[in-house]
Image: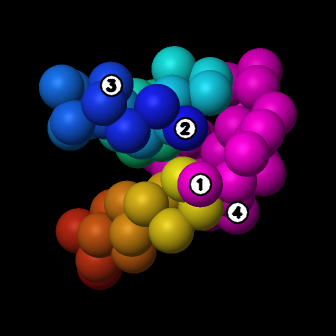
Amino acid sequence: MDSERKQQDPTLVCTCNDLYQVDIEDSIEFGETEYREIFAVQGLQPRCGECVEHVGEIVEVSLHKVS
């Protein structure tokens, strides 16, 4: 993970795959809420795993918006 890049752009969630918050939200809208499936929808695979918690937080917030 490149923490400097993440600090420069808070919408960047996964620096290994250049996965942004909007990409994760799109995957959730597509119906995916599992970490690996969110990446798969984007044609990606998780690498270092440093973003697991951040992805989970976005999923939680997005699911609460829908409720």
Amino acid on which disc 2 is placed: Met
| Quadrant hosting residue 52 | bottom right
Query: In what element is the residue under mark 4?
Result: loop
**Frontmost residue, 58 versus 54:** 54
Which numbered disc flags the more N-terminal residue, 1 or 2?
2
Q: Classify the position of the C terminus by image quarter.
A: bottom left
Amino acid on which disc 1 is placed: Glu
| Quadrant hosting residue 66 | bottom left
- Residue 67 is labelled as none
Marks 1 and 2 sit apart, C-alpha to C-alpha, by: 7 Å
* Residue occupying image coordinates x 32% and y 25%: 5
Which numbered disc flags the more N-terminal residue, 3 or 4?
3
Marks 2 and 3 sit apart, C-alpha to C-alpha, by: 9 Å
Q: Is residue 53 left or right of residue 64?
A: right
- Residue 5 is labelled as 3
Marks 1 and 3 sit apart, C-alpha to C-alpha, by: 14 Å
- Residue 1 is labelled as 2
Marks 1 and 4 sit apart, C-alpha to C-alpha, by: 15 Å
The stretch in magenta equals 26-50
2 up-or-down from 30: above or below? above
- Residue 34 is labelled as 4
Which numbered disc flags the more N-terminal residue, 1 or 4?
4
Amino acid on which disc 3 is placed: Arg
* Residue occupying image coordinates x 43% and y 60%: 54
Q: Is residue 15 magenta?
A: no
- Residue 50 is labelled as 1
The reply to whether the C-beta atoms of the residues labelled 1 and 2 are less than 8 Å apart is yes
Amino acid on which disc 4 is placed: Glu
